[in-house]
Amino acid sequence: MRVDAAIDEVTLGVLWNRLVAVADEAAAALFRASVSVIVGEVFDFSCAVTDRAGRSVVFPTKSMPLFNGSVEITTAALLEHIPLEALAEGDTLICNDPWIASGHLPDVFLASPIFVRGSVVGFAASIAHVTDIGGSLRRIGTQEVYEEGLRIPPCKFLVRGEPNTDVFSFIRYNVRVPDMVINDFYAQAGAHRIIQRRIAETLEEFNLDGLDALAEAIFARSEQTMRAAIRELPAGTCRARALTDGYIDPVDIHVAVTVDDGTLTVDYTGSSDECLDGAINSPYACTYSETVAMLHTILLPEVPANHGCFAPFRVVAPEGSIFNARPPRAVNIRTRAVFMADPVIMAAMHAIAPDRVIAAPGQAGGYHAHGHVDGVPFITFFMQSGGMGASARGPGMGCLFFPGTMSTSPVEIIEQQSPLLIDRKRILRGSGGPGQHRGGDGQEIVLTLRPGYEGPVTVPMHPHMLEFPAPGLAGGGPGVVGKIFLNDHRVSKLELNQRGGALVMRGRDRLNIHTPGGGGYGAPGSPPL
């Protein structure tokens, strides 16, 4: 079969589904090959297939939306440093610079060229959150990116399939668990090999010279469909504003959503300035990526994400604001900005698309545990989800991560990889906000140390919504705020931040974590929408 630029709908459907299956196979391989909790259990990663220019063609069915929009930004930046003609079969590129990758140092981007008949036809790419990237354990108390870990510029991780020994050395010298980190990088590169092989097989089967014609067909149809979905919305500008937890002072988030003839613009003008002494800033690439992912989720979730889906969107964030922080600002907890912007976008869009949005979710928190057992360092990661926001269609689900595809860490894995014990884990009934439909409930997890182990165990954390709850929508009430207790002492947001976002457990200490509930939708007793 010969496929050219005028791909018929049936053939396009077959090939498009084939590409999604390729991405899904690669994601499954990366998930299984990883030895870290955050990738191999929590699913904090994504894979992608791009065209020769780095434009995203397809992602896995289960993929971290936060990463998707940044793939083409990062790939294009890598190609500026290492052009196509400098690439060979077996090469794998690496970068984690927050201003050209996904926003903070632990999310590491790898890309491998796909060669077919001696020419590059596209790239296999992946972003995965490594267990450790060095730097301070004070996750939120840093002032500059230099404190936050190893910043890897665009370079070759593998050269013709062999390790770039200098790069391997500077990574191993700068992380606490080098074997785990390097293994996960190899898991990413292994997932790329699957994409490379399957793409070559697909092009051979369909007698294609490359991905260009197929990619352009996918982009054109996706963009056309997205613009049509935008044109169904009333033209004009709608606005929303919210205060949320900052470092010391609250973060003031302003969102203006403008619909104009098939184009949708999200403007963050008026939001807080970048934070000078806390790691809650977001580089523009991360802000852009999360924003377009949220718009895609709201408007056209049935169409697999790709460059064409994102083309009708514009994202405006003034330089020097918390949504467009300049280097070398600290950015480790940039989700304190971008994840909190999502419900403000939905609140603005409620005026024009009330059936497509939800109230604010109770944001999940990320927690590490670091220490030594018999002189050997350990690091494990556990994600604890809050409750989903309610919507016009029904109540929010409890203990579900949103936005994204991450999972709550299994109890057994936490206890296997650290001396932590999980004494109790339960749903916090009634923590979701009241309303016509209630918000989803959060959860409680109680941690102690294994008998006979005295510690210390450092627990770096970035819980959300300790001060400001998840707001309701359309008259719905807010959820219950998150809470942190150490030995029955409630640790305030200010106290936690003054400790750099890291608590230390010893002996019989007891750490109790409450995740926030989601916001409710509609005033209680109001009629259905």
Image (cartoon, rainbow, N blue to C red):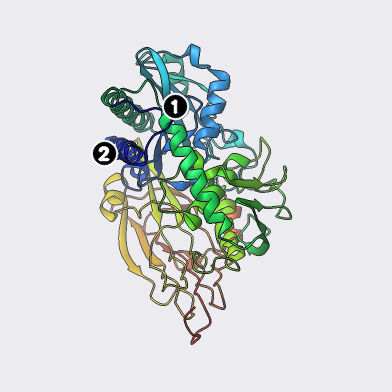
Q: Quadrant of residue 255?
A: bottom right
Q: Nearer the viewer, residue 91 or 490?
A: 91
User: Circle 1 — which element?
Assistant: helix
**Image position of 287 (left or right of 197):** right
Marks 2 & 1, CB-CB < 8 Å contact: no
Q: List the single residue furthest toward the bottom.
A: 525
Amino acid beneath label 1: Asp
**Image position of 233 (left or right of 41):** right
In the image, what residue occupies the spot 60% across and 33% down?
A: 146
* Residue that badge 1 annotates: 212
Q: Nearer the viewer, residue 284 or 413?
A: 284
Amino acid beneath label 2: Arg
Q: Nearer the viewer, residue 216 or 153?
A: 216
Q: Is residue 74 above or below residue 331?
A: above
Q: Is residue 49 above or below residue 332?
A: above
Residue 166 at x, y percent in the picture: 46, 15
Whether residue 335 can be seen here:
no
Q: Quadrant of residue 10?
A: top left
Q: Nearer the viewer, residue 51 or 493?
A: 51
The disc placed on residue 32 is: 2
User: Circle 2 — which element?
Assistant: helix
The disc placed on residue 117 is: none
Whether residue 220 can be seen here:
yes
